[in-house]
Image: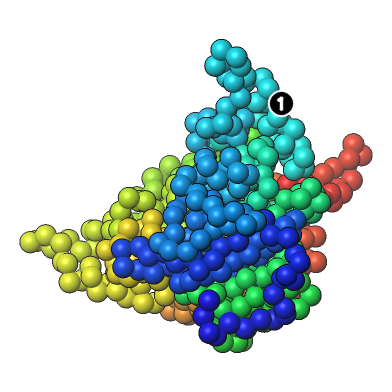
Amino acid sequence: MTNDLQAAGPLPPARAPLSMRARNISKVYQGTTALKGVDFDVVHASVNVLIGENGAGKSTLMKILAGIEQPTSGQLFSGDDELTLSTPRQAMALGIGIVHQELNLCPNLSVAENMFIGKELRGRFGNVRHHQQRELARTTLLRMGQEIDVDTLVQDLSIGKRQIVEIAKVLVSDVRVLILDEPTSSLSEAEVEILFLLIAELKQQGVSIIYISHRLEELIEIGDYFTVLRDGNLVGTGLKGTVTVGWLVEQMIGQQMTTELRAGAEPSVHENAPQALRVVDLDVASERGSLLLNKVSFSVKRGEIVAFYGLMGAGRTELFETLIGLRKAIGGEIHINGQHVPLRQDIAARIQAGIALVPEDRQKLGLVTGASVRDNLLLPNLNRYQRLYGLATPAMDADVSRIIRELHIKTEHAGVAISSLSGGNQQKVVVGKNLLTDPHILLLDEPTRGIDIKARRELFEVLDRLARNGLTILYASSDLKEILGGADRVLVMCQGRITANLPRQQLSEASLVACSQVIRKDPHGATHLHKEHA
C-alpha cells in the first residue's frame, strides 16, 4: 500500500466478513511492474468495485484472484487459510468465477455448449448429457431475463447477446465470488437493469461481486465498497454513500477533471461546408431475407461529428458495416465527396475511397492479437511507406511514435505484443491504425468500450481536433451521455430506419429515448410507439 492512500470513507468494518483477501500483491512482467504491493478485500455478499485508468492493474489483479496469473509476490487468503491458485479450474472449483472484458467464447459452438465447455455434465459411462445441459443453460438465461435459444451458434449472436452468454457461462456453476470485468460494455440499458437486479439477487444468496467498469455513475449506483488503483498502486478506498464521481476521477488520475467529453466545444461544422457523405434509400437484407436497413437516407458535411443512437438491433452496426463494404446493400445509393460509390464495391476499395471503420469487436475484427503494437498500427498502411528500395522504416517509426503520443497509448515501447496492453489501450491502437489510412470519413462503432474516463476524454479531444481539420466523423454508441456530450448532431435509429435527426441544441435524454422506440401500426392504421425490449 502506498503512502498517498486517501479514503473517501472508512475502510470496511473489521467485523465485516471477507470472502477473500489479497495482501501485498506485486506482479512484474518482463521488467514492467503491473502491481506494487496491493491489498484488496472482497467483502462477503457485497459489490466490491475496483476502478482505475487503463493500465492501472485492475485486470492483472483480477487474473490473480481467478488463478489465471500468479503473483510475483504477496499472498491470497480465504478466511484464515492461505490460497495458492495455480489454474482457473482450481479457482472455479473453489467457487471463484470471472467474466472477462474480452469475450472468451467459441463462435462455432452453440450457446449451451459454450456455457458448459470444460465442465460438461456426463453420465455414468462418460457420455455428455446434452439435454440436461440445454435445460440448465435455458434456466440460467431465463433467470437473467433472457430468452436466447440455447441451440443458436454464438457466431450468430450480437455482441450484446454474447456478453450475456459470457456472464451466464459463469453463473451456470455455483460461484461464491463473481468477478465482472466491464460486464455492461456491450449491453443495452434494459439489459443493464436486468443485470443489476441479478446482482442484487446474488448478493442475497451470499455471492460476493467484484465489479470493474469505467461507467462512473453506474459504479456509484451498484457499488458497496470502492477500491481505486493508479499505476499499479492502491491509492484510495471508500464506502457507498461517501463516494462521488468527482472523487473517483480525482483518485484515478491524480487531479480533478470534468467528465464532459467536449467541454466548451462549439459545433465543429459550418453551414457552407460541402457534403462528405450522402446515403439515399439504403436497403440491406439479412441472410433470411428480412430488412436490416430499410430506406435509410442521410447526409453528413465535411468536418461534422454525427452520432448514431438506438437500442440493440436498431441497425447502427449494420449501417457502418455496409458503408465500409463488409455488408452488401441490395438497393439505394452511397456518395462520398460527391462521387457515386458502387454498392458491390469491396472493403479495400472503400478504404481507398476514404472510409475507415473502428469496429465494435476489436479482438475479432480490429487487431492481429499475435503481433506487436507497431505491426498492428502499420499492417493496413504498408502501401504508404513503399519505396523503390523497400519500406521507408524511418517514416514508419515516426508515424508509430506520433500515433502513440497523440492517442496517449500506454506501452513500454512499440515492439511489445498487443495482447499485453489493457483493453482501452488496444482500442486506441485500432483507432490509430485507421487514422494512418488518412480517411475522409471515420466510422467508430462503440469507440469507448472498455476505455476509462480520461482516455475517453482524450479520444474525443482528438476527434474534435480531426473534425476541425476537415475529417468527417460518425460514431455509434449505446451510452446516452456519450451521445449527448460528443456530437454536433444525432441520428436516431429504430428497426433499421432513421427516426430522428436532432441538432445539438435539441438533444436530451428524453428526446433520444422517445425517438428510439419501436413503431408499430394497429389494424386500423394508427401509429403507436412501444418501448423496445432489447
Taking the view exactly as shown, the residue that stands out farthest to the right is 524
Label 1 sits on a secondary structure element that is helix
In front here: 405 or 243?
243
The quarter of the picture where residue 502 lies is bottom right
Q: Is residue 164 left or right of residue 531?
A: left
Taking the view exactly as shown, the residue that stands out farthest to the front is 80
The quarter of the picture where residue 27 lies is bottom left
Taking the view exactly as shown, the residue that stands out farthest to the left is 389
Badge 1, how many Cα within 10 Å: few under 14, some, many 20+? few
Q: Is residue 11 left or right of residue 331?
A: right
Please name the residue shown 44% across and 66% down the image: 26
Give residue 57's position: percent from left, percent from top: 49, 66
In front here: 77 or 488?
77
Please name the residue shown 60% across and 14% down the image: 124
Q: Is residue 283 above or below residue 36?
A: above
Please name the residue shown 44% across and 53% down the image: 69
In front here: 287 or 96?
96
The residue to which callout 1 is attached is 135
Please name the residue shown 60% across and 61% down the image: 21
In front here: 367 or 340?
367
Give residue 355's position: percent from left, percent from top: 42, 59
Q: Could one spot residue 214 in this view of the protein?
A: no
Q: How is the image coloured?
A: rainbow
Give residue 112's position: percent from left, percent from top: 62, 30
Amino acid marked by disc 1 = Glu
Q: Could one spot residue 79 in this view of the protein?
A: yes
Give residue 58's position: percent from left, percent from top: 53, 64
Q: Is residue 520 left or right of residue 424?
A: right
Counting the numbered discs, the total is 1
